Amino acid sequence: MKIQESYFKLDQVPGLWRSTVGLERESLRVNHDGNISKHLHSADWGTRKQQPYIQTDFAESQLELITPPTVSISELQDWLSSFHQIVATTNEENGDLLWPFSTPVIIPENTEDIKIAQLEKIEEYNYRAFLAELYGKHVQLISGIHYNFQINPDIEHDSFEAQSDYDDELQFNNKIYMHLARNYFRYRWLLTYLIGASPFVAPNYATNLYGKPHAERMRSIRQSRYGYQNKESVVMNYDSLEDFVTSIEDAVDSGALSLEKELYRDVRLRGGANARELLDKGISYLEFRNIDLNPYHPHGIDDEAIALVRLF
């Protein structure tokens, strides 16, 4: 059986719905006037070095709530609900709220008022300081949903057993994930059209690379070049894992990227400390990064959107 045929076996569809999903929900802390909170990340949430679920992202005021991986949509929402309850208790004491949109409504005129995440590891702080200088602090205030997806390993193994093109299951696994990544890139516009929800941004918002948005309204400013996007000269090759590894290493060697993790694409390949390690260990899961916060849902993403992304 050819590898392409093994992707779409009808009797495997129920098993594919048992694939694993984990969510990372970013959100700005603001006060009741909509201004960015000046409170530090609360010690009540645990130290960022040890706390796996409640973190900060780029800005000190930008929370990141991270669920463990699960196959159940309701369980994902339960985890997010628990995190929100914990955060809300401290926010209430400080007079803070979680801003429900991906883009901030008010941006300080003085960028010194946008504090970089005060991380324990100095190298992590310095990396964020470098990003602030390169892309601009305004960009670091943009939030969204990161959607981590792992294909049901049992289905992947059954597909491997049913085909004859590959003798190595690791290579077969990488082939499937690269195929999925390319397809996601091909159809991501549809997700942005259906669930894009960052149509506005503060009037003084600007990026260091691309300046101010060219339009007052769009489906998703976050997903445009005015979001967290690399230079246009940064080009990756997703034809195969080997091609991807070569292209990202070339980008770092040439100085187009400072580190591999500076690559901001809508799909990230996960499973190794660096891209080359994926060749030996294999891709474990994909991270989809193009989902805006849903301002009408308390957790930033509803059940339908979780299911829709899984369909891709």
Image (spheres, grey):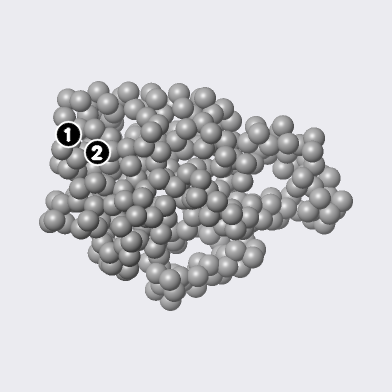
Q: Which residue is pictured at 57% across the width and 68% down the height? A: 237
Foreground residue among 27 and 218: 218
The residue type indicated by label 1 comes to His
Label 1: few (<14), some or many (≥20) within 10 Å? few
Residue 154: x percent and y percent?
A: 72, 36
Foreground residue among 214 and 245: 214
Foreground residue among 44 and 221: 221
Residue 177 circle label: none
Residue 121: x percent and y percent?
A: 28, 49
Label 2: few (<14), some or many (≥20) within 10 Å? many
Label 1: which residue? 32
Q: Is residue 274 above or below residue 286?
A: below
Residue 234: x percent and y percent?
A: 45, 70
Foreground residue among 106 and 214: 214
Q: Is residue 129 above or below residue 154?
A: below
Q: Nearer the viewer, mark 2 or mark 1?
A: 1
Label 2: which residue? 29
Residue 269 visible? The answer is: no
Q: Which residue is pictured at 57% across the width and 36% down the height? A: 307
Tell me if 219 is positioned left or right of 236 in this view: left
The residue type indicated by label 2 comes to Arg
Instruction: Tell me which corner region of the image, top left, top right, bottom left or bottom right, holds residue 129.
Output: bottom left
Tell me if 153 is positioned left or right of 201 in this view: right
Residue 93: x percent and y percent?
A: 17, 25
Q: Secondary structure at mark 2?
A: strand
Q: CA distance from mark 2 to mark 1?
A: 10 Å
Q: Which residue is pictured at 44% across the width and 74% down the height? A: 233
